[in-house]
Image (spheres, coloured by chain):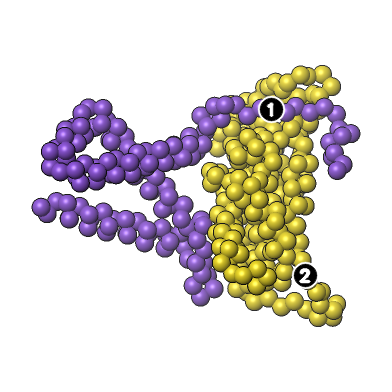
Chain colours: A yellow, B purple
Amino acid sequence: MANRITIEVTRYDPAQDEKPRFDSFEVPLRKEWVVLDALNYIKDHLDGSLTFRWSCRMGVCGSCGMTVNGVPKLTCATFLSDYAPGPVRVEPMKNFPVLKDLVVDTSDFLVKLEKSKPWIIRKVEKPLDEEYFQTPEQLEAYKQYSMCINCMLCYAACPVYGLDPLFIGPAAIALAQRYNMDSRDEGASERMDILSQHDGIWGCTFVGECTQVCPKHVDPAGAIQQYKLTATMEWVKALVLPRGSE
Amino acid sequence: MINPTEYLPKSYHPRVSTYWWLTRWVYLKFILREASSVFVAWTVILTLLQIRALAAGPARYAEFQDWLRSPLLLVLNAVSLFFVVFHAVTWFNLAPKAMVVRVGGRRLPNLAISAPNFAAWAVLSAAIAWILMRG
């Protein structure tokens, strides 16, 4: 294995640049290094002005999502040696405005996440000294969706979101489904207004890449298709049953 | 509503290229899957035309069969067959995503959902082939 590898990194300084460009750096190629290690090496030894987000370094915080050789990846979980002999191209996550170098503006996702009401909604809260019991089967029903770390790689992979920024997007729908499937929750009908609109689940054309790039195996594409089925059943029920019946 | 980016410095908004679907094989496969519906529609139209020719008598049907033997139709139908098979295979492979079946509290594996679809497809195709070939 060669002991060095070339990294091409997107550079964009909003104060000076009209559009992004690439800078090349040569970094040591070590077996145990991930792409994030290479970026930190550049920042520490070659160019301190390189700007990128990271925090936990162990695939939990969801901060270090970037585009590595065209594919959305958590850079802390992407080994450099898999790209040898290089070069490796590191770009900001696609489908988001770029603020500086590899840092993107995620405000749009945060607004949509809140809209999908990802919290437990109760019509009547139990008194504080009473518990909400849940069986292992009831936990299993939503556990997969609760693994989402809001890394937004699914938004970067979704061409629908890229072409139609109004689309509520994979993670927000998967997280809504996480609470819809929770036996303690009673907010499914509130979420349906947001999810079953045109820019909700029906915007999805089932490319399926959100599921492929998800580092936590949440399967947002599955969540969306399952919700399409639920929404259709609700629509049929509303059509067939008399108004007001539940 | 408060604009969350109001106080941020300017940012670069990349435009999605018209040719985004050529940038990755997975995207191209998706577009081919979507485009396959055109060939599925053509196969339906062809079947309807065939039934109409059949109902119009043996002379009309022979004429229809001659038309089917023209090079243009042979190429078109060969391409259609490829896309109809591609459509069916990708469709059955996607079925487990939309259907969650739980048995004894555990979710059935993907193969348990897609395999019966493929099996039903094979059995129906074999039955139709048997009906057509036997005479």
Number of numbered markers: 2
B131 relative position to A240: left or right: left
Q: Which residue is mark 1?
A: B14
Q: Is the residue B28 above or below the residue A243 in the image?
A: above
Q: Residues within 10 Å of mark 1 (few under 14, many from 20)?
A: some
Looking at numbered disc 2 in the image, what kind of residue is underneath it?
A: Arg
B83 relative position to A132: left or right: left
Which quadrant does the N terminus of chain A fall into? Answer: top right
- Residues B127 and A173: in front is B127
- Residues A101 and A112: in front is A112
Residue A242 seen in render: yes
Which mark identifies residue B131? none
Q: Is the residue B82 above or below the residue A144 in the image?
A: above
Looking at numbered disc 1 in the image, what kind of residue is underneath it?
A: Pro
Q: Indicate which label's residue lies in the foreground, 1 or 2.
A: 2
Instruction: Say which residue appears at 65% left-offset and 72% top-offset.
Output: A245
Whole-percent x and y of residue A153?
A: 65, 43
Instruction: Say which residue appears at 78% left-offset and 78% top-offset.
Output: A131
